[in-house]
Image (cartoon, grey):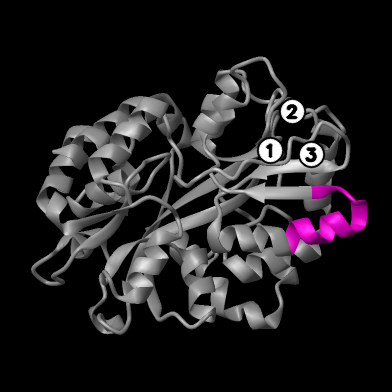
Amino acid sequence: MSIIKTNITRRRLLANVAAAGLAAPFINSVVRPANAQSKGVINYAGYGGSYGDALRETWFEPFEKETGIKVNLGPGASLALAKLQNGDGKTAQWDMIDLTNAEYITALHQDLLAPIPAGSVDDSQLVSGYLKSHGFSYVTYVWVMGYNKSKITDANAPQTWSEFWDTKRLPGKRALMAVQTDGDALEAALMADGVDRSKLYPIDLDRAFKSLDKLGRDDIIWTTSLQEPVQRIGSGETSLGGIYTGRAIIANRQGANIGFSLKQGIIGGVTNAITKSSANTKEALELYNFMATRGDLAAKFTARTSYGFPHKDVEKLLPKEADDIRAALPTNPDLLSSGVVVNDEWWSTNLASAVARYQEWQLG
């Protein structure tokens, strides 16, 4: 197998984000974890919503049953949260934090993460390169154009970002994320303006924001969590929005009627890392080892979410009932032939400046 490596008021929200230096794929109220100093507990910061449910039910509950180690899962994962764990010399509240691949690179450069000792995790069943020096790149996702099928037919749905940008052809607001942590809206803006997917990096920020100007602030609904676009599109509040395939698939299995186009999908990844000041690194490494060696659960997770997991046999182990998600897998050649793999190094280098400019643009 191969896998890609890789509302408060708007003004108050953005001001708070800027002040905190928050560059998260998800802004949410952080659930304070148990202050665990003893063995047998891991406090894990993830992204919440249906993705968090899938993590807990597919991975953490079986892990707890097998090892007796309790995993306390909360939302609010971000680079800013990783920084907070290392700022006062105290033991971290959060032991493990999900980061976009670009955030992981930044956190590594800022010395926020605990190393993974050689030989501590059996990576023999993983695709090479996904167990890193200070983290486990355990999931690959796709961000695409989503639409409410009750309002937009499949035949009339946008197939390119240029069509998504066309408010004359498809009137109404579009949902986009209020915060950037790696590629999505800026790459989409460039493709909407005619830039070939192979020539997106380095990102021409001037051109990207001119493209956003053409779409217009008045035609954008800013969303502040990864689950929010699913809710807004599913409810019909908006007909169109950028959406993660896995969350749309899960919502549809629960009765939603959300369509999405895989063309020009933006492919990125999540790396989980152990915070440098964690008191529970041994337990965290046990979780990594569990996840790296359970191909059956990797297949179950992928079947549920459509997100790629770097176990060598995951696609062979997918159950027949998962056939409906195979087209959305990040390894699908058709998706890869028209999609964009996020340039994590560019985003890590330019994250602060790109985020600041994105926030300024939203404020007008």
Q: Quadrant of the C terminus?
A: top left
- Per the rendering, the mark at residue 96 is 1
Image point (64%, 71%), residue name:
303
Locate residue 338 relative to residue 57 in the image: left or right: left
Image point (26%, 75%), residue name:
157
The CA span between labels 2 and 3 is 9 Å
The CA span between labels 1 and 3 is 7 Å
Give how far across and how far down residue 193 sits, in percent. 17, 50
Locate residue 263 relative to residue 327 in the image: left or right: left
Q: Is 323 drawn above or below residue 217 in the view shown?
A: below
- Could you tell me which secondary element the residue under label 2 belongs to? loop
Question: Mark 2 is on which residue type?
Answer: Ser
Count neighbours of disc 3 (C-alpha within 10 A) and say few if under 14, some if 14 to 19, many if 20 or more.
many
Question: Mark 3 is on which residue type?
Answer: Ala
Count neighbours of disc 1 (C-alpha within 10 A) and say few if under 14, some if 14 to 19, many if 20 or more.
many
Question: Mark 1 is on which residue type?
Answer: Met
Residue assigned mark 3? 284
The CA span between labels 1 and 2 is 8 Å
Q: Is 128 drawn above or below residue 3 in the view shown?
A: above
- Tell me whether circle 1 and circle 2 mark residues in contact (CB < 8 Å): yes
- Tell me whether circle 2 and circle 3 mark residues in contact (CB < 8 Å): yes
Residue assigned mark 2? 278
Q: Is 103 drawn above or below residue 60 in the view shown?
A: above
- Tell me whether circle 1 and circle 3 mark residues in contact (CB < 8 Å): yes
